[in-house]
Structure formats: C-alpha cells, structure tokens
Image: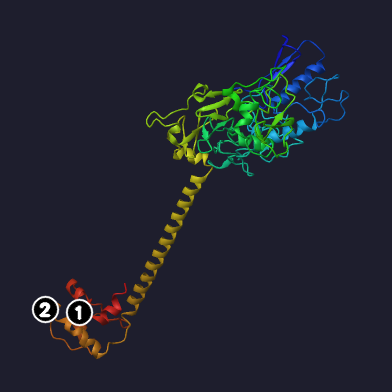
Amino acid sequence: MLFTGMRFEGSTIGIAFTATICETPKSAVGLVYDGGEELDRLISTTAHELGHIFGMDHDDTETCLCEGEPSGVCVMNATLGNPAPKTLSSCSVATLRTNIAGDLGRCLDNEPGKTITDPACGNGIQEEGEACDCGSATECIDPCCNATSCQLVAGAECRAGPCCEINCRFKTYGSVCRPLKNDCDIEEYCTGHHSECPGDFFLQDLTSCKSNNSYCYSGVCQTRDGQCQYHFGTNDAIDECYTLLNTRGSESGHCGFDGTQYKPCLERNAFCGQLQCEDGGILQTTAGDHKRTRLPSSSFICNSVTTTAGSDEISPGLVRDGTKCGDERVCLYAECVNVTSVDIPPCPVDSINVKVCSGRGRCNNDNQCSCSVGYTGSVCAAVVGAEHHSRVNGGIIAAAVIGTVVMVFIIVIIAVFIIYLVLHSKSLSFSTAEKRTPERSPEPANAQSQVQPSVKHIPTRPAPSAPANPNVSSSSKSFIPTRPPPPHTKPIPPPRPSVSTSKTSELSHDKPIEKRFTRT
C-alpha cells in the first residue's frame, strides 16, 4: 500500500485493483491519499483499498449490512461515512471467505522471504536463526521444539507443516502436499528436506487449456461460460448481447467506468467488456446487482452484473483478463489484443532438444520450470541422483537398501546353518561307522564269496606258510602281517585292510562294501 500527499482527480481518495492479492506481475498495489486528515479516515480508506485487493467489491447498502456503525455504512461502501466506518459488511466477509478458499488465496500460505522484526525466541513466530518457536516454556506443547533455545529437539527434523510427519521427520520426496485445483494449476510435492510445501505455482499465463480453446490466466482457465457459472449458474449469452449492448456504454453494457460515466466498447473490444450471460439464473455473488436487458431484435434476455463501481476499481462485471476473444486474441484491460503483444517472458528451454523445461516439467507463473518428480535443474534436465534420493526421499532408498542387506544377511545365516547341520550329521555318521566296523560280527559266507573276486586284483607276494587262523576270513588273510602279533592283555580287532587306489575304485561297485563305507 502506497500513500501520497498528491490529490487524485475529483473526489477519489484511494485506488486499487480488485482481486490482485496473488497476481503477478501486477502485484497487489493500492494507492491512498493522505492529506493530513483524521487518522481514522486514513485507516478506513486503507482498509477499503485492501478489501479491493482481496477481491471485495463495493457494498450494496440495501443488502450488505454491518452492526454498530453510527454512520450506517460499512468499510466497503463506495462513499466514506462520517464517522469513518470500521466494520466489514456481511457481504464483504462472505466474499473474503469464498475468495481465500478459492484460487485467490493460493499464495497466502507461501513462506515469506524475510521478516521485518527483530528475532526474539519465545514470541511464537519463527524468525531468523530459529528452527522453531512454540512460544514461552510454559505455553509450548510442541514435542518437536525446544522452547528455551527455539531449536528442534534431538533427532527431530521438523516441527510442523504439510511436509512434516507427526514423528518430527520430513515427509518423503515426491509426497504430494498441494494437489491440483484445476487444469491450470501445478501440483506441488515435498522436497524431503523442508517441512513446508514449496511455493504455490500455476501454469504460465496464456498457456492453452480446454483443448486449446481457452487460455490460462492467473491460475484459471478463463472462459465466459465459467464466469457466468460463477455469477449466475448459467452459460454465456449470444454474441448479440456483446456486440449490441457493450458498444452502447450504459449500465447494461460497457467497457468500464471512468469515474463519471460508463465507457462504450469499440466494436473490436465488445467481447472484453461487460460479461453477458443467459437469463434464468440468480446472482450468486456479492459483486453487486444484476441487469436484465431484452434484445430489441429478439426475445433473448441478456443478464449482466452491475455494480456501484467507482473510479478506484475495475468492475467485477467485466470479462476477465486472459479470456479468449478471437483467434490468437485475448482480453486484457477490457481490450481484445493479439497474444503476441502480451509481454510474457519466455520459459527456460533445453539447449539440446530445444524443449520447454526439457519436456520434464511445466513453465509456471514465475516463468521458471516446475519439474516433474525425479527431475531437477533450471530446465529439468538433471535426474535426481541417488545421493539426492537418499536424503530427500526421507528414507525410501535407505530403507530399501537396509531391507535388502538384512534379507541377504538372514539368507546367508540360514545357508551356513544348514551346511553346518549337513556336515555335522555326516561327521557323526562317519565316526559311528568307524567305531562299529571292528566290532561287527563275522560276515556270512555269501558275503565272503562276494568280496572274493576283488582279492585277485590286489598285488601280493608269497608269504611264509602259517597255520590258518580260524577266526579270520579268507578275504582278510592277505592283509594280516606274517609275523605273529605281540601278546595283548585283551583281544584286539583285526587290523583294517590297506586298500590301493585301484581297489578302491573297484570296491565302489561292490554293493555290500558300498553300504558300509560310502556314507562318509
């Protein structure tokens, strides 16, 4: 809001554009005359112009009421009362609620770039140097914030916000924090390293929408049908309502108000003047009153919004800026101009493929690229790397890696345990077989006959004759030393035969031997 000591023409003491609080590059600017009069009059005028910036129109004194005002008028009345009003009317409050809940409030949640007050821990306002500020130590109930230091508690990453979990941790990268509102909006998602949702952006002005039949402007696909639906719940009127009525310059059709009279539209600007809608609907907004006009050449009734608009505002009854008014033409300040004449900076282009935002994002109202999930950079040419994901994903990849490592570790442990059991069981079986072999009972005759064919393959040399040992089978005689064994206090089992490699390979085909010794 700007204040000046220079007088405006006529009786005007303030001026502002309606519903421009979030518009760029216009910005929300109001101008108020300060002639050194009473402070309450200056404050009331400032509130009045701020009301316009937030989308409020002039009050209809018959339907818009406010209690407790001695002058009988409210803040948004077209004329300043005496004493100066301090209360918004019921119409203004309803309009403000509707506008903030709709597209008009899209920028109000954006984090400001800086504060204008000195930081003070405990005032409940997060300021420079503070990670959080939950008020004084006695009133702070935030488990994520240390009220004494205005810093996060140990282990916390955030304390509040659409991208902060209840456990004081950032939401994962790519989590949607602001869904699409309409086909001219841009979806915002969490970055993984901030508790707030990124700034609320929408598609760049004059981006095509509605199957290339309309244009996006101020975050809305502007159509006359949509504007009539907003005001009356009906559709756009026939062309004659624009070409016949708006060129007259009257209450029922015009291209604006210059402070003293309605301005007639030039023929080329007729579709950018007063919005003309089909009859049958009831005025659904608090923008003012409506005017029903029957065309002289037919029975068609043109319905339009009329207001007590002064020179300090653009009438809300006009066709909105950005509305298509012909092939490659668009309404701008009640004029139908060529889209090429509108000064809109170009969007960033990939130098290799010459694509806007590399085809991996959309150009926003700040004339910058809003990249799709997984891409980053000024033209969305860079892929979000693993090191970025590991941090900004808030644990997605880290959890996957940890889960994989744990799973592999468990599988290895199970495999080692199974191998241990198999080897241990075989070792026990071999040990048992060795211990039992010397103590086994003499083999039956048929077993000896089966082993006998293997004896002829064992190289032997003549041995001195000795009396036969009735306790030793013939198959084991060739393996017993020829000299007598030394005396023993108790009998010992016969020595184990020494088998050559060739015999081992042949004995592997001997079924009775295989049953005893191949289990190792």
Give the image location of residue 211, x and y in percent: 51, 38
Q: Quadrant of residue 291?
A: top right
Query: Alpha-carbon distance for marks 2 and 1?
Result: 11 Å
Give the image location of residue 89, x and y in percent: 80, 30
Quadrant for the N terminus in the image: top right
Front in this rendered view, residue 50 or 114? 50
Mark 2: amino acid: Arg
Label 2 sits on a secondary structure element that is loop
Query: With 98 as the anchor, is 23 left or right in this view?
Result: left
- Which tag, 2 or 1, sits closer to the chain's start? 2
Q: Number of numbered discs present?
A: 2
Q: Give the residue pinned by disc 2.
A: 461
Q: Quadrant of residue 232?
A: top right
Query: With 445 as the anchor, is 261 left or right in this view?
Result: right
Give the image location of residue 401, x and y in percent: 46, 48
Answer above or below: position of 18 versus 480: above
Q: Residue at x 18, y 85 (%)?
A: 452
For mark 1, does the 10 Å Cα neighbourhood hold few (<14), some (14 to 19), or many (20 or more) residues? some
- Is residue 409 in sight in this rendering? yes
- In the drawing, what numbered circle is on residue 173? none
Front in this rendered view, residue 413 or 263? 263
Front in this rendered view, residue 330 or 201? 330
Give the image location of residue 155, x and y in percent: 60, 40
Answer above or below: position of 311 versus 145: above
Quadrant for the C terminus in the image: bottom left
* Contact, mark 2 vs mark 1 (Cβ under 8 Å): no
Label 1 sits on a secondary structure element that is helix
Tell me how the rendering is colored. Answer: rainbow
Q: Residue at x 82, y 14 (%)?
A: 38
Query: With 520 as the anchor, is 451 left or right in this view?
Result: left
Query: With 242 as the anchor, is 305 left or right in this view?
Result: right
Q: Give the residue pinned by disc 1.
A: 479
